[in-house]
Image: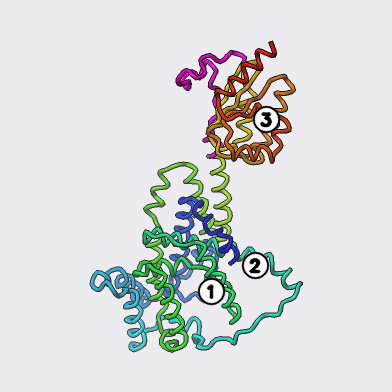
């Protein structure tokens, strides 16, 4: 709830598309692989959670194939895909569940059902109770609580992004976080555990026509009704039918076309895509999200640092950047560098090296910063180091094109303590004029 109130849900817009596709495709493959046991009726009591180990167990048990389960699963897939071509308002998956349950019940077909795998479905709630609070418990749980909140928020909002791409809409991130936090608090009062938005159920909902918040509300009430009223019938649903439905869901959410398209694109996007996909499949989605976001951040910083342009606009090799002859009468003792882009920690080293490693012996260096939207603490530190270094060599630094916002940062970061205010100007013509006067006085 705190993340939602602080409006931090909006930060999700900065997660790259390649990460979302890798994560979603990985989840689709996990959903697919988790249904193989029920699809083929292998009757493996407890399949390993690990992806590779799970498939090794599958291969070792394929001699236990149940042909009835396969027939039900294939029929479910066909009904789910093709029924809506006949009747658009009724999801094919609902028809598949009803038909397969009736067939298994009345013909006594030997396949696993919800009852044989999980027993009776509970039909009551625990009485609500407020837990006992004490400092030691809070101290012990505060770290995992924050971890669960952050990972739950990321997973839910990624699920919302996936559904956005499926229906062409835009979710409200902060409302999602507030709702999820509230639901988890009240769920815990009844003995529930923390839950997130689930991609599998969201994708199923969307594919069957659910495109508004009402669909989620109906979903919750239907589950409640099944638990309280229809549990004796729901427990008869064959597991192979559910496996068939989820395999269709996995295919629909796999985004294999987008996956293939990204593989043909930028190398950095390919790295993010494959890293997120493989980590999701081989390890788990928590590690995939964490490493994927960190990797994306590093790649973004690298791209931003490479995008900044620092040019010597008075050097003879750069005459093509001169326009309107504005620098045509600049003395040789003056060098003018122009910076285009944010001067943040990723670009600060590039800035420092470019300014310091010039092949000229100027008396004055003008740094034109009209296209610098922001400077962070590292950028200010580099600016201070350059100013101090050239001051010791007897070279004057003049800063031009400084916006009012940057001036506030100059004051807070101590630039005025190193460089006289009169050499921090708003216009290149003023900077050149001051440089010429300084040369006249020094001569």
Q: Which residue is mark 3?
A: 421
Secondary element type, mark 3: helix
Between 439 and 118, the residue placed more toward the observer is: 439
Q: Residue furthest left?
A: 86
Which residues, given as a range, are shown in magenta? 304-333
Quadrant in which the C terminus appears: top right
Q: Is residue 372 above or below residue 37?
A: above
Q: CA distance from mark 1 to mark 3?
A: 73 Å
At numbered mark 1, what does the secondary structure look like: helix, strand or loop?
loop
Q: Residue 306's x, y, as percent?
A: 54, 35
Please tell me in which quadrant of the rendered image residue 285 appears.
Answer: bottom right
CA neighbours of label 2 inside 10 A, class few (<14), some (14 to 19), many (20+): few
Q: Which residue is mark 2?
A: 145
Q: Is residue 120 left or right of residue 131?
A: left
Q: Where does label 1 land, which residue?
A: 46
Query: What separation in Å lies between label 2 and label 3 (alpha carbons)?
Result: 50 Å
Foreground disc of the pair 2, 1: 2
Who comes first in sequence, dot 1 or dot 3? 1
Q: Quadrant of residue 152?
A: bottom right
Does the image show residue 346? no
Classify the position of the N terminus by image quarter: bottom right
Q: Is residue 262 above or below residue 169?
A: above
Picture layout, residue 290 above or below residue 430: below
Magenta stretch: residue 319 in it? yes
Residue at image coords 60%, 80%: 189
Of the pair 237 and 21, the residue shown nearer to us: 21
Q: Position of residue 307 (x, y in %)?
A: 52, 35
Comes first in the chain, label 2 or label 1: 1
Work out how far the residue at label 2 is from the one at label 1, CA to CA, in angstroms: 29 Å
Q: Earlier in the sequence, mark 2 or mark 3?
A: 2
């Amino acid at each position: 709830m705190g993340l939602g109130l602080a409006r931090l849900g909006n930060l999700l817009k900065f997660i790259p598309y390649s990460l979302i596709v890798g994560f979603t495709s990985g989840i689709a493959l996990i959903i697919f692989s988790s249904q193989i046991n029920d699809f083929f009726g292998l009757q493996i009591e407890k399949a390993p959670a690990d992806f590779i180990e799970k498939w090794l167990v599958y291969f070792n048990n394929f001699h236990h194939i149940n042909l009835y389960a396969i027939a039900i699963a294939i029929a479910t897939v066909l009904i789910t895909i093709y029924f809506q071509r006949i009747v658009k308002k009724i999801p094919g998956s609902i028809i598949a569940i009803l038909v397969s349950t009736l067939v298994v019940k009345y013909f006594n077909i030997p396949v696993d059902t919800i009852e044989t795998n999980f027993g009776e479905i509970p039909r009551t709630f625990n009485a609500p109770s407020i837990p006992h609070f004490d400092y030691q418990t809070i101290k012990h749980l505060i770290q995992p609580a924050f971890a669960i909140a952050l990972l739950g928020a990321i997973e839910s909002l990624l699920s919302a992004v996936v559904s956005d791409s499926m229906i062409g809409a835009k979710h409200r991130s902060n409302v999602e976080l507030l709702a999820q936090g509230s639901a988890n608090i009240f769920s815990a009062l009844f003995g529930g555990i923390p839950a997130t938005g689930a991609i599998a159920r969201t994708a199923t909902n969307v594919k069957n026509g659910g495109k508004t918040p009402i669909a989620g509300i109906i979903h919750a009430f239907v589950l409640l009704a099944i638990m309280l009223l229809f549990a004796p019938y729901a427990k008869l649903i064959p597991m192979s039918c559910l496996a068939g439905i989820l395999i269709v869901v996995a295919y629909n959410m796999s985004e294999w076309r987008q996956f293939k398209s990204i593989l043909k694109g930028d190398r950095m996007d390919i790295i993010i895509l494959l890293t997120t996909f493989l980590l999701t499949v081989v390890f788990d989605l928590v590690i995939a999200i964490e490493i994927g976001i960190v990797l994306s951040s590093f790649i973004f910083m690298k791209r931003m640092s490479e995008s900044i342009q620092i040019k010597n606009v008075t050097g003879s090799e750069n005459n093509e950047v001169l326009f309107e002859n504005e620098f045509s009468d600049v003395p040789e003792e003056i060098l003018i560098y122009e910076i285009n882009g944010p001067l943040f920690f990723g670009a600060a080293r590039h800035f420092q090296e470019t300014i310091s490693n010039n092949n000229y012996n100027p008396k004055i260096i003008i740094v034109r910063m009209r296209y610098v939207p922001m400077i962070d603490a590292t950028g200010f530190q580099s600016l201070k180091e350059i100013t101090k270094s050239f001051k010791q060599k007897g070279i004057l630094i003049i800063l031009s094109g400084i916006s009012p916002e940057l001036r506030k940062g100059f004051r807070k970061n101590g630039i005025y303590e190193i460089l006289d205010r009169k050499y921090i100007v708003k216009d290149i013509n003023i900077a050149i004029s001051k440089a010429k006067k300084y040369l006249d006085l020094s001569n």
